């Protein structure tokens, strides 16, 4: 993940955070309405279309990285103001007077990107940053807000393949907000199955796909900062 250092000052060559939306044979990034793009509520300051990378396998998590170069499909490269993203994460402006002394904390964070296609279809995705700040116990820079440690065990969906419904089962180690989104093969969200606080323990949610066409779908389960994505097949 890209490093995002809360103590870098403007003008040092690290004033922007780069993000790329990767195009594929099934997803044309030129269909995205640039004006609707938002990363944690922040709009990009620059953008361009260029072939920069090959997407990671869909079985990988949101923080998986790729070293493969272009795949002949246009990607949408975006530049966001670094300080605006930091402010969005911490919900305050970093203090210029804070000390640079002390142990550096490194926290892997997922940032949520939302946008709309030209036909107003909503899309969303996640990118990761390695957020670096200073340990407050040394009397130095302010620390990230506490992130509740949530252990999520996704047991998968059964049956799979299915027709017309399937049950997604999971276990939570602690009470937290849980969101389950269903996406089609183009990355378009077709339904939000669940979005509420749930207690620790075993849970399940049933997706009725009777109004959907046969094909491959993906379900993404997010519990706090933990995200799991799996594939399922609807066969009618």
Image (cartoon, grey):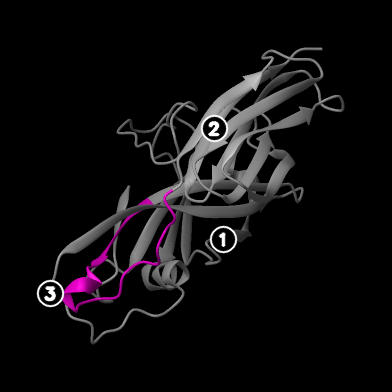
Q: Quadrant of residue 97?
A: bottom left
The span shown in magenta is 129-149
Q: Are marks 3 and 2 in contact (CB under 8 Å)?
A: no
Q: Secondary structure at mark 2?
A: strand
**Is 145 part of what is drawn in magenta?**
yes
Q: Position of residue 101 (x, y in %)?
A: 12, 74
Q: Which mark is residue 101?
A: 3
Q: Earlier in the sequence, mark 3 or mark 1?
A: 1
Label 2 Cα crowd, 10 Å radius (few <14 / some 14-19 / many 20+): some
**Residue 136 appears left or right of 72:** left
Gap in Å between the C-alphas at discs 3 and 1?
33 Å
**Is 46 part of what is drawn in magenta?**
no
Position of the C terminus by quadrant: top right
- Looking at the image, can residue 24 be seen? no
Gap in Å between the C-alphas at discs 3 and 2?
39 Å
- Looking at the image, can residue 84 be seen? yes
Q: Position of residue 78 (x, y in %)?
A: 46, 56
Q: Residue at x 52, y 67 (%)?
A: 42
């Amino acid at each position: 993940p890209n490093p995002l250092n809360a103590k870098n000052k403007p003008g040092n060559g690290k004033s922007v955070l780069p993000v790329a939306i990767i195009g594929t044979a099934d997803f044309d990034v030129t269909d995205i309405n640039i004006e609707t793009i938002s990363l944690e509520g922040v709009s990009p300051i620059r953008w361009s279309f260029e072939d920069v990378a090959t997407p990671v396998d869909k079985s990988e998590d949101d923080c998986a990285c790729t070293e493969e170069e272009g795949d002949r499909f246009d990607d949408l490269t975006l530049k966001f103001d670094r300080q605006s993203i930091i402010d969005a994460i911490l919900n305050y402006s970093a203090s210029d007077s804070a000390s640079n002394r002390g142990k550096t904390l490194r926290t892997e964070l997922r940032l949520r990107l939302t946008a709309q296609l030209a036909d107003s279809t909503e899309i969303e995705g996640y990118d990761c940053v390695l957020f670096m700040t200073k340990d407050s116990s040394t009397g130095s820079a302010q620390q990230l807000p506490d992130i509740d440690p949530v252990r999520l065990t996704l047991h998968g969906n059964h049956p799979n393949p299915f027709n017309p419904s399937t049950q997604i089962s999971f276990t939570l180690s602690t009470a937290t907000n849980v969101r389950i989104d269903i996406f089609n093969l183009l990355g378009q969200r077709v339904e939000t199955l669940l979005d509420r606080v749930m207690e620790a323990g075993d849970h399940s949610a049933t997706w009725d796909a009777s109004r959907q066409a046969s094909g491959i779908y993906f379900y993404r389960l997010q519990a706090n900062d933990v995200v799991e994505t799996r594939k399922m097949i609807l066969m009618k």
